[in-house]
Amino acid sequence: MTAFDTPDAGMAGATLTIDLGALVANWRALGQRARGAETSAVVKADAYGIGIEPAVTALAKAGCRTFFVAHLSEGVRARAVAPDAAIYVLNGLLPETCGHFAQHGLSPVLGSHEELLEWAAFRQGGAAVRSAALHVDTAMNRLGLWAGEGLNLARERSGTITAAGIGLVMSHFASSEDEADPANARQAAAFADIAAAFPGIPASLKNSSGHFLKDVPSYQLTRPGYALYGGNPTPNQPNPMQPVIGLEARILQLREVKAGTQVGYNGRWTAPGPRKLATICLGYADGYPRNASWTDSSTGGSAIVGGVTCPFVGTVSMDLIIIDVTDAPAAAAVRGAPVTLIGGPLDIETVGAGAKTIGYEILTGLGGRYARRYVGL
């Protein structure tokens, strides 16, 4: 138990348990794979749903010195609990925000000439700022300079790069979770040229799955995200990471229905025989996707009740989900009893598949109505 525990678990319909000890263990395990490079932590999207403040506090205490966020506002939150860390904002420099970066000691990840010029001008005006990162795009076509633009900038090192105070050069894998994808080798080769063009400036390429690619250097800094939170960085293989979150909801009501009874909005699921149903206190307003609905024509999500996997029935609604608990132990399927939505065999990949999405969306969509219980530190 920690100071981050919420006091109102008895009032909540569902409880999210977050194991900060497992988070730290995953960071350390990835650090061992980083081959001597510094291992940072990506804590964007409210630390993938578990909370920026507790996550950054735990990781900083364990020795993490560098963090990455997506939004400037996230960086401000991280700075409040990690006063000495380097904090990079991945989404770059929005116009006229340089002053906020300076005020909070944050570093923009610059990915265009416009951003470079604005940041360089701000620095040359005498502002006290931390070093920025330069993002060079090697495949994503999303953010970042073209690789050729990055090489051209390197050739005129006395110009914009020097003025912008670049302290890190980075790129981002597009397909690193698929070890067999030839795009990984192409990106690694392209980035090797970029890193070599900026001697003396630290470089960073590896994301979570990148730690498991063979023959890819770690450079000076790695940037794990999803794997820190228990996501599997090696799909279709055993997950090397420890689970970080568990989710339980409580049974509000039970009822028995006859064969042919239609259940939920629009009656999209029909009981094939006499069934015992439980309604739990959780829905898509809590971040559990509506695509986890189980209908007459499609499968969906499930919960564990008394050790038995029980399918959802009908449409996931805003605040409620109905579960078929016919096969669950009678002692476990009672009013007020907990059911497991994430935990054990229902890891975040399995939950994501049941909701026709990915584990990333499950994690980052975790809602604000849960009682949150932090353990492990």
Image (tube, rainbow, N blue to C red):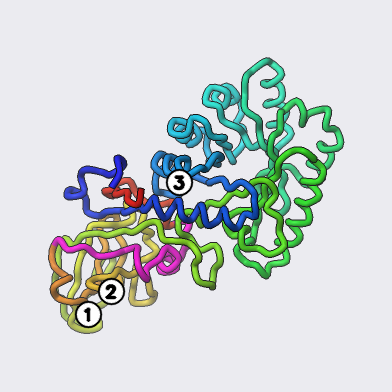
* Number of numbered discs: 3
Amino acid type, mark 3: Ala
Label 1 to label 2: alpha-carbon separation: 8 Å
Q: CA gap, disc 3 to disc 2?
A: 30 Å
Tell whether 342 sits left or right of 228: left
The location of residue 11, given as percent across then percent down, is 17, 48
- Residue 176 coordinates in the image, percent (x, y): 63, 61
Any magenta on residue 279? no
Residue 170 seen in the figure: yes
Report which quarter residue 305 is drawn in: bottom left
Marks 3 and 1: CB-CB under 8 Å?
Answer: no
Question: Are the residues tagged 1 and 2 within 8 Å (C-beta)?
Answer: yes
Q: Which of 100 and 84 is in front in this view?
A: 84
Question: Which residue is farthest top?
Answer: 126
Label 3, label 1: how many angstroms apart (C-alpha)? 37 Å
Please, is residue 319 above or below residue 322 in the view? above
- Residue 54: image location, x then y, percent: 39, 42
Q: What stretch is highlighted in magenta?
A: 336-361
N-terminal of the pair, mark 1 or mark 2, is: 2
The residue that disc 1 covers is 327
At a point 67% along the width and 37% down the height, the residue shown is 133
Q: Label 1 neighbourhood size at 10 Å, few (<14), some (14-19), many (20+)? A: some
How packed mark 2 is, by other alpha carbons closer than 10 Å (few <14, some 14-19, many 20 or more), is: many
Mark 3–mark 2 contact, CB under 8 Å?
A: no
Horizontally, residue 207 falls left or right of residue 270, namely right
Name the residue tied to disc 2.
Answer: 310
Q: Is label 1 in a helix, a strand or a loop?
A: loop
Residue 47 bears which disc, if any? 3
